[in-house]
Amino acid sequence: MAREDSVKCLRCLLYALNFLFWLMALCVLGVSACLRDHLNNVLTLTADTRLEEAAVLTYSPVVHPVVIAVCCFLIIVAMVGYCGTLKCNLLLLSWYFGSLMVIFCVELASGVWTYDEPMVQRSDMISLKSRMPHFGLQRYQWLTHAWNSIQTELKCCGVIYFTDWLEMTEMEWPPDSCCSNQYPGCARHAHYNDLSDLYQEGCGPKIYSFIRGTKQLQVLRFLGVSIGVAQILAMTLTVTLLWALYYDHKPPDPASPDALIQTHSPAEDTQMPSHSHPRAPEAWANTPANGLTQFEMEQLS
């Protein structure tokens, strides 16, 4: 009875852990998808600079294709684990344990291999100005799109200040993506009427903060550690459940006392011949040696 309660408790814990695997894997995929678009724009602006190397070192552990593939595989493994726990199938649970072990080793190796502190300084932000003269050119549409996306998402303008556009390009006013309220010609209107309609902070410090790490990156790191801890716990519970299920399916040992008791059935007692029971001593005492009864002896006398 106690073993049945233990198995039921183990199954409930594995159900909860598999649900957490689904939830955390989906969260990692969603946050990584949001970061990838923003990261691609940053990498476009920082191409061939130290900033690009720092951004890759910081975000490759969480947006690397291997990590994305592992999260997708983890969802499938959690489904197999759920089915194996539901049906108490030894084969599915064994495959579930082996898959969790492989995923954990891949995650650990990826984390150790890609762990490195980015070497970047604020002075490196000045190198972003070299990307500004190509803004708006026909053959640099990808760079124009990256600048517009960065300035809109980070709510910034230029590298240090919005006047960087006037110094580094032949433009008379900043791009429209520098406006807090964007519409065609908003930057021209703000330049001649109200400069407060333009973002006053440069994109350099914000890109530097992004490379050093964002809240989304911290969330991904927390989820990665949580998934690893949950995997260790799930593997421990799976081994315990496998042992309990194997013990239940294991045939009893014929040499054990329990097996001997179980092999002896009451039906065998009923099938024993009547001559196997010894005769009572009193009956033998009342019977003469020649086999005659006392009444017969009196008649003969």
Image (cartoon, rainbow, N blue to C red):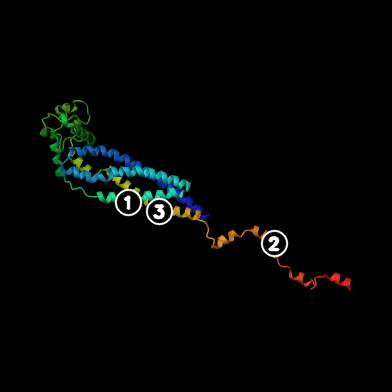
Asked which secondary structure carries label 2, the reply is loop
Q: Which mark is residue 105?
A: 1
- Nearer the observer: mark 3 or 1; the answer is 1
Q: Name the quarter where the C terminus is drawn.
A: bottom right
How far apart are the two marked residues, 3 and 1, measured between alpha carbons? Answer: 15 Å
How far apart are the two marked residues, 2 and 1, measured between alpha carbons? Answer: 68 Å
Where residue 98 sits: x, y (%)?
Answer: 38, 50
Sequence-first tag of 3 and 2 = 3
Badge 2 amino acid? Pro
Asked which secondary structure carries label 1, the reply is helix
Q: Is residue 230 visible?
A: no
Q: Which mark is residue 273?
A: 2
Left or right, residue 207 beside residue 100? left
Badge 1 amino acid? Cys
Sequence-first tag of 2 and 1 = 1
In this rendering, is residue 72 above or below 286? above
Dot 2: few (<14), some (14–19), or many (≥20) neighbours within 10 Å?
Answer: few
Residue at 24 percent of width and 38 percent of height = 38
